Amino acid sequence: DAGVIQSPRHEVTEMGQEVTLRCKPISGHDYLFWYRQTMMRGLELLIYFNNNVPIDDSGMPEDRFSAKMPNASFSTLKIQPSEPRDSAVYFCASSPPGLAGGSEQFFGPGTRLTVL
Amino acid sequence: GQNIDQPTEMTATEGAIVQINCTYQTSGFNGLFWYQQHAGEAPTFLSYNVLDGLEEKGRFSSFLSRSKGYSYLLLKELQMKDSASYLCAVRAPMDSSYKLIFGSGTRLLVRP
């Protein structure tokens, strides 16, 4: 089975440019999460979706960040305009239904973003 | 507020046993996870505790005490490949759903 797929794996851009990160969750998983990881702040939840609907976006840093999930197999995280402080590894994760029983999250390989 | 504490770094010897502690203070609790993350890779699931006690899975065990807000991950028969960061994460209920709150991770170095 294919795991969570993210693209691109690496992105280098200049300050002010738009950046779009993409994620394909594991088929059958109805939760999708976007995380950001830095040395200073560790792993932070940005936003998550359930059945394509955003549930909690309280971790989105500011209006420059937006996320969409147009269907069950695709999500994007967009940064516009990008800034050097956005440099981080961005992970997408998905998990299957069944909150009550406890469910692990399956992480994608991450996108390493560098904003110059 | 939400707070999860883990030691920053630990060092252990191949073949030995190491215990990584995690303490948490969160507004609500609905389970505790341990993830392993090798350098440059994604976190991978190790264990889940929702009730007090010990969960054993091969060389890895995880313990939870909800009254103390405390968990530990026990790694036995350490191997060089166990050198990685270990992340403690608490699932806290938020309105009608939940979110995982991660600690900063413990970087474990296994030496020959």
Image: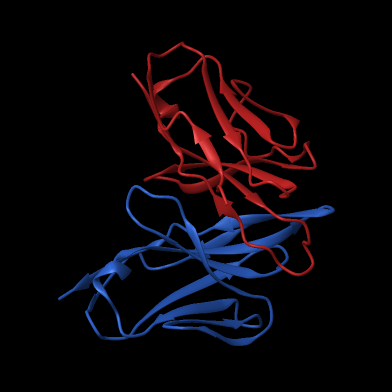
Chain colours: A red, B blue
Residue B61: image location, x then y, percent: 49, 83
Q: Is residue A6 found left or right of A84 in the rendered image?
A: right
Q: Nearer the viewer, residue A74 or A86?
A: A74
Residue at position x 32%, y 52% in the image: B39
Residue at position x 51%, y 45% in the image: A108
- Residue B100 position by quadrant: bottom right
Q: Nearer the viewer, residue B19 or A1?
A: A1
Residue at position x 64%, y 47% in the image: A26
Residue A80: image location, x then y, percent: 55, 16
- Residue B15 position by quadrant: bottom left
Residue at position x 44%, y 46% in the image: A41
Above or below, B107 against B50 in this view is above
Q: Which image quadrant: the N terminus of chain B?
A: bottom right
Q: Is residue B58 found left or right of A28 in the rendered image?
A: left
- Extreme-bottom residue of the structure: B53
Q: Nearer the viewer, residue B48 or B98?
A: B48
